[in-house]
Image: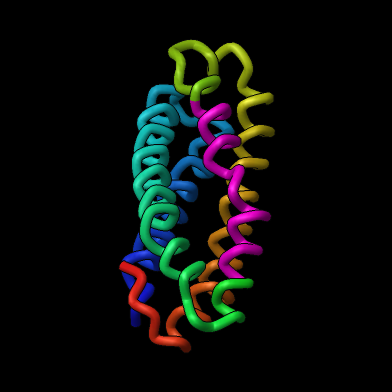
Amino acid sequence: MQTAIYRKQHAELERIVGVIASLLADGEAQDLRINLAKLSGVLRVHLTIEDKSMYPIMLASASPEVRDTAAEYQRTMGDLLVTFNTYYAKWIETGAIEAHRSSFITETTTVAGALQNRITLENDNLYALIDKEDLVVA
């Protein structure tokens, strides 16, 4: 399976998001910040690998289905890192979560939902296509 590394990273992202979700209501803000930093690290590495390796390979594929699918995914999901970086910069600061817990919960739920949507679409559609076409993307 050509997409094993990407799927493994997705599982780790989902695990960290699960930890954050379990801490949202009454977890310590410091524990939330620690897990936000972990999420940021894994997400940035994952998206960088996708953007620098997987998508360029797909966009250069001889298969129109692969090229079109990659272009569509890049176009519709390309702003996730920008959204996450804005969210992260706002909430990683000491005192931010404590001062605005309800806003943090709302924004975290929104960002986590967008991330989960991307993970689901990539796992179920994009990675399935890569595996079907036996593309080497890592």
Above or below residue 94? Residue 15 is: below
Q: Quadrant of residue 19?
A: top left
Q: Residue at the spot x=34%, y=82% of the render?
A: 1
Q: Residue at the spot x=44%, y=62% of the render?
A: 56
Q: Quadrant of residue 72?
A: bottom right
Q: What range of the chain is rendered magenta?
A: 69-88
Is 87 magenta? The answer is yes
State the quadrant of the C terminus: bottom left
**Could you say where residue 80 lies in the image, as x and y percent from the top left?**
58, 44
Q: How is the image coloured?
A: rainbow
Above or below residue 95? Residue 29 is: below
Q: Residue at the spot x=54%, y=73% of the render?
A: 126
Along the line of sight, which residue is nearer the eye, 15 or 75? 75
Along the line of sight, which residue is nearer the eye, 74 or 45? 74
* Tally of marks: 0
**Could you say where residue 47 lies in the image, as x and y percent from the top left?**
43, 50
Above or below residue 104? Residue 3 is: below
**Could you say where residue 128 lies in the image, as x and y percent from the top left?**
51, 80
Image-based side of 118 in relation to 93, left or right: right
The rendered magenta stretch, by its main secondary structure, is classed as: helix
Q: Residue at the spot x=63%, y=17% of the render?
A: 100
Image-based side of 102 in relation to 22, left or right: right
